[in-house]
Amino acid sequence: MLVDETKFTLVAGHGGAGSVSFGKMSVVGADGGNGGVGGDVYIRVTSDLKALGRYPQDNTLTAADGEKGSSKRMSGKNGKDLEIIVPIGTTITNILTGEEVEFNELDQRVVICKGGKGGWGNYMFKSSVNTSPTKAEAGLAGESKTFKVVLKLIAQYGLIGLPNAGKSSILNQLTNADAGVGDYPFTTLEANLGVHDGKIIADIPGLIEGASTGKGLGIKFLKHIEKVGMLLHCIAANSTTIMADYQTVNSELEKFDPKLLKKRRIILLTKTDLVTAEVLKKQIKELTGLGFPICPISIYDWDSFVKLEKAL
Ligand SMILES: Nc1nc2c(ncn2[C@@H]2O[C@H](COP(=O)(O)OP(=O)(O)OP(=O)(O)O)[C@@H](O)[C@H]2O)c(=O)[nH]1
Ligand SMILES: [Mg+2]
């Protein structure tokens, strides 16, 4: 399942304690080393949309603590860093401060919680007047922050439409994706991504009437559309109600957020091989009134994809 929301607490490692130690020969005096620095917590950005699945709600993820210092002025080992992997398009919000960080760049890697400083060993407190101090510091705690984590898809193009309109078939034709295709509604339960000419295309599960209020799979994915550059609105040509099909999806977009209607859009009139040239002509005329470019397409017509690629 695509996890697109979670909450986690990230804790950087605690600094190691400084050591109290004395060299065997009295002339050496204090020789306790410093504690190691606690591990940092990093966030790294991946193209794997399912990455949040490894962080169940309310988990606490901790980097390793720094180790204690030891005799002969030996510093403790620094704690190992922890790397959290989030999909591109993830926003994290610090629950306490409200501070937000957006991750919109592949392979971006940032420190999100700094590890605690290691404590000084007694060697560091040595002076000409006191060669045998018994004092050493405890390490400091690492930063700890709780984040709300929300993923919104980032894609240049988003395929939308009623269930069964042919969205996944188009994604598969245009890109390297291998999305499931089936002759029944809701074949696609999670968004699929493909890359065409360096641009990301998202295949968004079918929207039905009531999607904006949670019917079907819609609402989970409508919010993803906010971050999509251009909509590729698929309408099946073999439907006898193409205008109503258009309106259903359009009004769900509007109800969810009227700003979605301002997005650039191309209408893909799909499965054109299933209708006669005469019917197709009539449909194109009907849809022209909507004011969007119209692109008739069929997975059995190579030329139609060449035209679509040009349009993109
Ligand atoms: N004849 C014909 N059939 C098509 C065409 N494109 C898709 N289909 C068929 O239509 C059915 C639905 O296609 P999908 O690509 O799964 O449709 P979808 O819009 O992704 O459907 P959901 O994921 O359920 O929302 C499948 O049986 C496809 O083989 C086309 O151009 N011509
Ligand atoms: Mg599909």
Image (tube, rainbow, N blue to C red):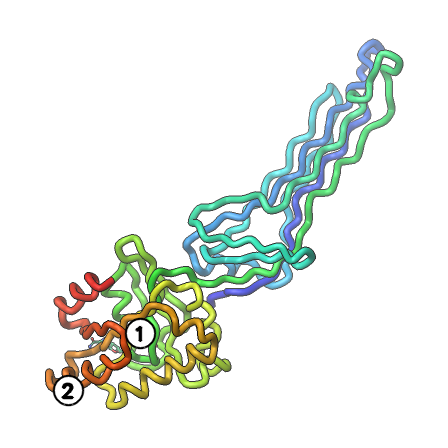
Residue 146 occupies quadrant: bottom right
Q: Which mark is residue 140?
A: none
- Rendered-image quadrant of the C terminus: bottom left
20, above or below 193, in the image: above
* Residue 185: % across, % down: 34, 81
* Residue shown at 72% from the left, 35% from the top: 16
- In this view, the residue in front, 157 or 262, is 262
Q: Is residue 287 left or right of residue 2?
A: left
Q: Horizontal and vertical percent for residue 39?
A: 63, 40
Question: Callout 1, which amino acid?
Answer: His
- As drawn, the residue found furthest toward the left would be 277
In depth, the one of 149 and 23 nearer the eye is 149
Residue at 38 percent across and 71 percent down: it is 262
| Mark 1 residue element | strand
Q: Position of residue 60 (x, y in %)?
A: 65, 55
In this figure, which residue is indicated by the disc labeled 2? 279
Residue 163 in which image quadrant? bottom left
Secondary structure state at the residue bearing disc 2: helix
Rendering quadrant holding ligand 1: bottom left
Along the viewing direction, whichever of 281 and 133 lies nearer the viewer:
281
Label 2: few (<14), some or many (≥20) within 10 Å?
Answer: some
Amino acid type at mark 2: Val
Q: Residues within 10 Å of mark 1 (few under 14, many from 20)?
A: many
Q: Seen in the image, is 110 located left or right of residue 65? A: left
* Left or right of residue 256, residue 98 in this image: right
Ligand 1 within 8 Å of the CB at mark 2: no
Q: Residue at x 60, y 39 (%)?
A: 80
> What residue did someone put label 1 on?
233
